[in-house]
Amino acid sequence: MPIATPEVYAEMLDRAKAGGFAYPAINVTSSQTLNAALRGFAEAESDGIVQVSTGGAEFLSGTTVKDMVTGATALAEYARIVAEKYPVTVALHTDHCPKDKLDGYMRPLIDISLERVAKGLDPLFQSHMWDGSAVPLEENLEIAKELLEKCARARIIMEMEIGVVGGEEDGVVGEINEKLYTTPEDALATAEAVGVGEQGRYMLAATFGNVHGVYKPGHVKLRPGVLKEIQDAVGAKYGKDKPFDLVFHGGSGSLLEEIHEAISYGVVKMNVDTDTQYAFTRPIADHMFRNYDGVLKVDGEVGNKKTYDPRSYGKAAEAGMAARVAEACEHLKSAGTKIS
């Protein structure tokens, strides 16, 4: 059962919260980066989450097809086959879906899962993210309530975001300002609108200075204590300890102590993309520089097929990314915690 069932996914998140660790959620854009993620999880003996963004899904469908649902579906089906060969359990997730892409991405994928569940099958993806950070909170929560009801029927966990993650990802730009910090009032409004689990399980991407991409030290100030403030505020009202399953976005370049502090406040999932992109591409660049006269037919020569064969540098890229995934598992304390 390498692809988690809904019950096992819920158990994974519960174990993370109780055990003081979080799962790396690795963004993938191809079958090869998927294999790298699976390999990294296996090498760390960690379960994990594989996710695909709107841009990643579009890319997966082919650069002339450009259909997000096709790409995401293809990835999920491929993952179900290859993941069987790895001794870890993974959940499939879709990343950041803004309002203008709901009808072309998240909603159709939920419909596919509803059809599957009606036939007695597991959902196609185990969780989906609604990114309402670009709309007013009231509208964000109204849409979240509608999506959560549908996700619950499809046996899917929803992820939602309140506050804004700065930087840029897939064309969505978040300004670096006070909106990077979620307030207790925002969290209380969220619990009022979508409950604390009784209306359907969801994860909450609350922001505490997070920024997509990598920035020089001092550019952005993370305040993990914001997470404690919102957990305490909502927990006091509803009589629950750490009522939210929290998600850490925009963590590239974060200090390890900041990551561990965030986990201590209930973070169960941390998105990892920028760092693994670089870890995948860096060995390819190394290969090209060292073998330039083999990958190029310089001065009328014939080159070297062994060096321009995509498998030659693809193997190095997979190994590089897998090592970074395994490192993420160590940082998030999920290494050695696999269920199976």
Image (cartoon, helix red, strand yellow):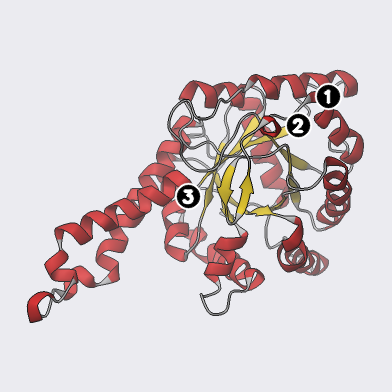
Residue drawn 42% across the image and 51% down it? 277
Image depth: mark 3 or mark 2 in front: 2
- In the rendered view of the protein, which quadrant contains the C terminus? top right
Say which of marks 1 and 3 sits in front.
1
Q: Which mark is residue 64?
A: none
Label 3 CA crowd tier, 10 Å (few <14, some 14–19, many 20+): many
Kindly indicate whether the residue at mark 2 contacts the one at mark 1 (C-beta within 8 angstroms): yes
Residue type beneath disc 1: Val
Q: Which mark is residue 87?
A: 3
Q: Quadrant of the N terminus?
A: bottom right
Q: Is residue 268 above or below residue 71?
A: above
From the viewer's side, name the closer residue of 194 and 329.
194
Q: Give the image location of residue 270, x and y in percent.
A: 57, 38
Looking at the picture, tell me which residue is in the foreground, 280 or 98. 98
Residue to which mark 2 is pinned: 244
In the rendered image, the vertical position of residue 315 relative to residue 87, given as above or below: below
